[in-house]
Amino acid sequence: MISQPKTIIDIRDVIKTFQVGEIKVHALRGVDLAIEEASFLAIMGPSGSGKSTLLNILGCLDRPTSGYYYLGGKNVAQMDDDTLSSIRGKRLGFIFQSYNLIAQLTVIENIKVPLIYQGVNLQDYEQKCIELAALVGLEDRLEHRPSQLSGGQQQRVAIARSLINDPLMILADEPTGNLDSKTGKEVLELIEKLHRQGKTIVMVTHDYEIAYRADRVIHMMDGRIDRDEIRK
Ligand code: ADP
Ligand code: MG
């Protein structure tokens, strides 16, 4: 028997409206999206179409104005900040365009950052951090600080950091956006490797070449999903 893919994300009728002074900005105008476990989804679309807003909601960094968001079967759409941050810390990993590393910390310390909010004993994770640094090819840079690393290396640290909690899903917003094309390709290959190892990946990009390495590409337009392409 072939087992059915499991849906880990299910969002329905998601609307996000920002109030800026007197003006309402309709960032998401009704989005429905189901994401299967272990899939690799790319989100494309012009600037301002709602990609980051959607990713932030998927990543529990923000809440929809209305609608449902089931993550692993639970409706998280209207949970309070503390609950959301606990879900983020335990179940989600993040990779940002600008890496978001802490300048004063070494590579190994940066990889540990998500654990700080978990109240675990950091000592217990030393070996895991070293293994993750090795996974991203930085085993000989453990004591370096971000300013002593190239952009590609900094993004590798961010990727290792995103994995420290064994997340259910990794969310990446333009992860190659600040990198030259060769380094960007290397970072993408690393993300693909995580996908092959069974991680669910959701990645925003405006680069077609990058998007079409994913299993599925959704195209955002004006706060809605305009097109949903299943590739593999
Ligand atoms: P994209 O990532 O596709 O470029 P965004 O999701 O960042 O688009 O933005 C969608 C729309 O929502 C834009 O019009 C943007 O200006 C607006 N927007 C995004 N975040 C905020 C915010 N925090 N406050 C007000 N407006 C916002
Ligand atoms: Mg954006």
Image (tube, rainbow, N blue to C red):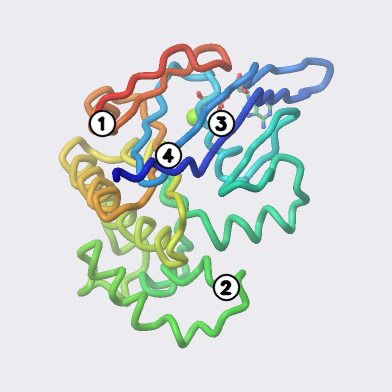
Q: Along the horizontal axis of the image, is 15 left or right of 121? A: right
**In terms of depth relative to the viewer, which is nearer, 189 or 139?**
189
Q: CA distance from mark 1 to mark 4?
A: 20 Å
* Mark in front: 1 vs 4: 4
Quarter of the image where one finds residue 149: bottom left
Q: Are marks 3 and 2 in contact (CB under 8 Å)?
A: no
Which amino acid, mark 4? Answer: Glu
**In terms of depth relative to the viewer, which is nearer, 40 or 119?**
40
Quarter of the image where one finds residue 141: bottom left
Q: Are marks 4 and 2 in contact (CB under 8 Å)?
A: no
Q: CA distance from mark 4 to mark 2?
A: 30 Å
The residue wearing badge 3 is: 54
Which amino acid, mark 2? Answer: Ile
Which amino acid, mark 3? Answer: Leu
The residue wearing badge 1 is: 210
Q: Along the horizontal axis of the image, is 58 left or right of 7? A: right
Which amino acid, mark 1? Answer: Ile
Q: Position of residue 216 (x, y in %)?
A: 33, 28
Q: Residues within 10 Å of mark 4 (few under 14, many from 20)?
A: some
Indicate whether 121 appears above or below 57: below
The residue wearing badge 4 is: 36
Q: Position of residue 33 (x, y in %)?
A: 52, 28
Of callouts 1 and 4, the N-terminal one: 4
The residue wearing badge 2 is: 116
Q: Describe the element under mark 2 as helix, strand or loop.
A: helix
Does the closest atom of ligand 1 sit within 8 Å of the Cβ of label 3?
Answer: yes
